[in-house]
Image (cartoon, rainbow, N blue to C red):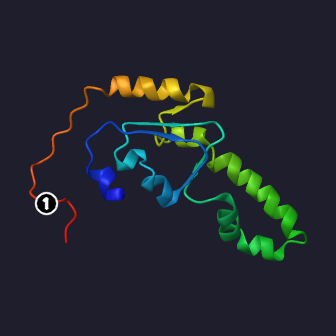
Amino acid sequence: MLFAYGASTVPKVTVVVRKAYGGAYLAMCARSMGADRVAAWPSAEIAVMGGEGAVNLLYRKELAEADDPDTLRSKLLADYSEKFSTPYKAAASGMVDDVIEPADTRAYIAMSLEILKSKREVRPEKKHGLIPL
């Protein structure tokens, strides 16, 4: 699948509707995989890793020493989600072009395809695929 995304020359439009973490975000045709337009719904979560795993990894010591680890974990998870998992943070870093309302998805895709209808990407001619054996 990654090879197909990387080698394709057609217009690529991505809409993140739920969760996109780390390598899975790349595999879903992220900007770095050649997506021409990337949008996300306000409820989307885009981050290096999910909040639960990140909190358990980053705050392992604090959680082990806490009197009430469940309350602390909930607080840290909410804080992580607010700071790192929002599509607005991804948009600020250039991973997402637009944050759109779900009702505007069809119009966004149509507009993106209209903009990209004349896209031409010239690649070197090869007899075989681009993956080295």
Q: Is residue 5 left or right of residue 53?
A: left
Disc count in the image? 1
- Report the quarter where the C terminus lies: bottom left
Tell me where residue 63 appears, x and y as whole percent: 79, 71
Which residue does the image show at 35% across and 24% down from the upper left? 115
Q: Is residue 22 left or right of residue 121?
A: right
Q: Is residue 2 above or below residue 124?
A: below
Q: Is residue 55 left or right of residue 101?
A: right
Q: Secondary structure at mark 1?
A: loop
Say what amino acid the circle numbered 1 marks.
His
- The residue under label 1 is 128
Which residue does the image show at 36% across and 23% down from the upper left? 114
Which residue does the image show at 36% across and 39% down from the upper left? 12
- Report the quarter where the N terminus lies: bottom left
Tell me where residue 45 appears, x and y as whole percent: 62, 48
Tell me where residue 16 appears, x and y as whole percent: 54, 43
In this view, the residue farthest toward the right is: 67
